[in-house]
Amino acid sequence: MNFVGDTSIRFADKVLKFTGSGKMKRRIFILTDFAIYLIDPETEGMTRRIGLAAVEKVCLSKLSDNFFAVIIPTEYDLFMASTRKTELVQVMVDVTKTASDYDLEVLLSNRFEYNASASLVKEVSFEESEEGIKTRFKWK
């Protein structure tokens, strides 16, 4: 895999990416010093590259779940799950600060919206219950 212009991989992990239709797809999430790459583990092909400069903020719930969203105003957003969510977000904040002297906004909220596709906005909410954490999606 050729990461043009990138000098080092800062973080890599297996994640679940949620599509606009709500399907889950396994992806390898790679964070370099300049971009986020999503790799299909079956084909080993890159499915998406997002320059860190395009990322506006990262949203995650206040609960101990694995969900987070990467908000990209110029494209559709990413909604994913990772067992290493906290570490992943911290490395993104550090890399963004180092690369551009920009403080990446991290929104901690049990309810936020994201653009699941170019024409579909979803609201996701998280709620703690006796059975565990409930995650609900609402089309806007």
Image: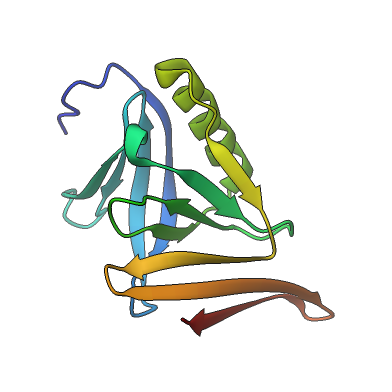
Q: Quadrant of the N terminus?
A: top left
- Residue 81: percent from left, percent from top: 51, 59
The image quadrant that residue 78 belongs to is bottom left
- Residue 53: percent from left, percent from top: 34, 33
- Residue 55: percent from left, percent from top: 40, 42
Relative to 60, does residue 96 appear above or below in the rendering?
A: above
- Residue 36: percent from left, percent from top: 33, 39
Residue furthest to the right in view is: 130
Tally the marks: 0
Relative to 98, does residue 74 appear above or below in the rendering?
A: below
Relative to 55, does residue 33 appear above or below in the rendering?
A: above
Relative to 96, does residue 14 appear above or below in the rendering?
A: below
Q: In this view, does 112 lie to the left or right of 55?
A: right
Q: Residue at x 52, y 83 (%)?
A: 138
User: Does the rendering let one see residue 89?
Assistant: yes
User: Does the rendering let one see residue 18?
Assistant: no
Q: Which residue is drawn at 56% across and 39% down?
A: 105
Q: Which residue is drawn at 29% across and 50% down?
A: 74
Which residue is more in the foreground, 2 or 54? 54
Q: In this view, does 87 lie to the left or right of 41?
A: right
Q: Residue at x 46, y 64 (%)?
A: 114
The image quadrant that residue 20 belongs to is bottom left
Q: Is residue 11 left or right of residue 94?
A: left
